[in-house]
Image (cartoon, rainbow, N blue to C red):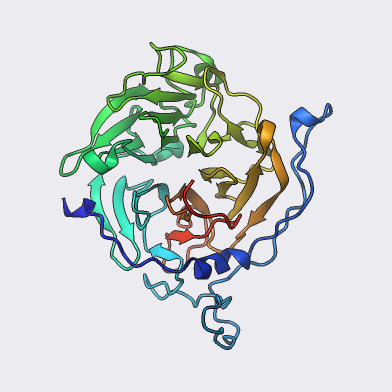
Amino acid sequence: MAAHRSTRLPRRPRARAGALLAAGALVLSGCAQFPDEHPGAWRDQPSLEPQAGPQPSVEQPPPPPPEPGQPTEQPPTRPVGCVDPDPAVVATCLDPVGAIAVLPDGQGALVGERTTGRILRVEQGADPVEIARISVDASAGGGLTGLALSPSYQEDELVYAYASTSGENRVLRIAPGDNPKPVLTGIPKGGSGNAGALLDDGRGALLVATGDAGSRSGAADPGSLAGKVLRIDGFGAPAPGNPDPSSRVVVSGVSDPGGLCGAVGTGGYWLTDRGGDRDALHRLEFGGTLGGPAWSWPDRPGVSGCAASGTAVVVALTDAAALYSLSPGPGGGFTGQPSKVMEGTYGRFSAASRGPDGLLWLGTANKAGGVPVPSDDRVLRIEPPSGESGKD
């Protein structure tokens, strides 16, 4: 199917993309505080204020052109309609982005629109191509909120989606040229907590994070699929290697997941979760309940998608319209001081994924509660805040 052909485009220099983040990042030295390191009540760090990031504005006259080979720090000019001159922008004029899955070549990605159920293939210099459309119910935080490639995508080109219908949440499998087919149904749907997330675990299985459908008792019930992290095969059955071979459940106690990230070789798996009194980032340990957070935000900035490598975890913040970058350390903690970056630069970040080349893909949701510019909503491809790149 033409929509699935992998067309490699010339890669935009990283230095130019990295300049967008370099202008917005403030990395502070010091040691982060964690609940397991202090006997008293633990609090989030209160003063992570970044320097001003690059703004899509032409209020100031442009500076002289840089020397050859040097990155430019000139802010992008303002978009006109769906034409956005910012070199980091891959796709424009989308509905709010619910999920991103980067293709194996790193030059393109599949993007899911949360409220329309459309799945689009996007790449630099080409118009988005719709490859599938799922009928979704986007009320109560639901809709199309998760995408993942099959563990054997380069052979079968299968894609998995997490979506809400009128009566339940489900996982669907999409084959080239075929209609989406459910592989896991019966995930409870409620008045809240209907978002979900997907991740290829790098071991031939699919991780599925499900919301609690507004019921904390359901999240604790081992017989319910609500409020869990599941590990399944391509047909929805328990994957080989699960702690309980007869069960899909590997972690319980999830509230309202925003994203799953990580893989074998990157320091484990991470889950962002929006709990009752705070947002949190968890390092997953299979075989029990969701433990205490590795990091939390009492001000609830709206954690969404995440992207992880062996040296950094980047969390998209929707309500705070920023990214949060943390450096995992030994023993489950973090090293140095986390940084809040790109605040207000592109608006409400809603999805994140890391490409095989180390570049960070981001989606926005400015049409859903933000202040959209003419080219919103957008998909971006940038250097990660940590500056690390390359394959793991």
Q: Can residue 189 be seen in this view?
A: yes
Q: Quadrant of residue 158?
A: top left
- Residue under the point 33% across and 60% down: 123
Place residue 331 in its image quadrant: top right
- The number of discs equals 0
Image coordinates of residue 281 in percent, x first then y, are 60, 36
Residue 277 visible here: no
**Rendered view: 84 above or below 1:** below
Q: Where residue 106 appears, x then y in whole percent?
A: 38, 54
Task: Look at the picture and state if 223 lies above or below 361.
Answer: above
Name the residue nearer the viewer: 303 or 154.
154
Q: Is 356 placed left or right of 273 in the picture?
A: left
Residue 314 location (% of width, % of height): 57, 48
The quadrant where residue 82 appears: bottom left
Q: Which residue is drawn at 37% across and 46% down?
A: 115
Counting from the top left corner in percent of width and height, residue 312 is at 59, 46
Instruction: Single out the residue that lies furthest toward the right.
Output: 40
For residue 32, side relative to residue 237 (left or right): right
Write the residue at 48% across / 63% down.
372
Determine whether 128 is above or below 324 in the image.
below
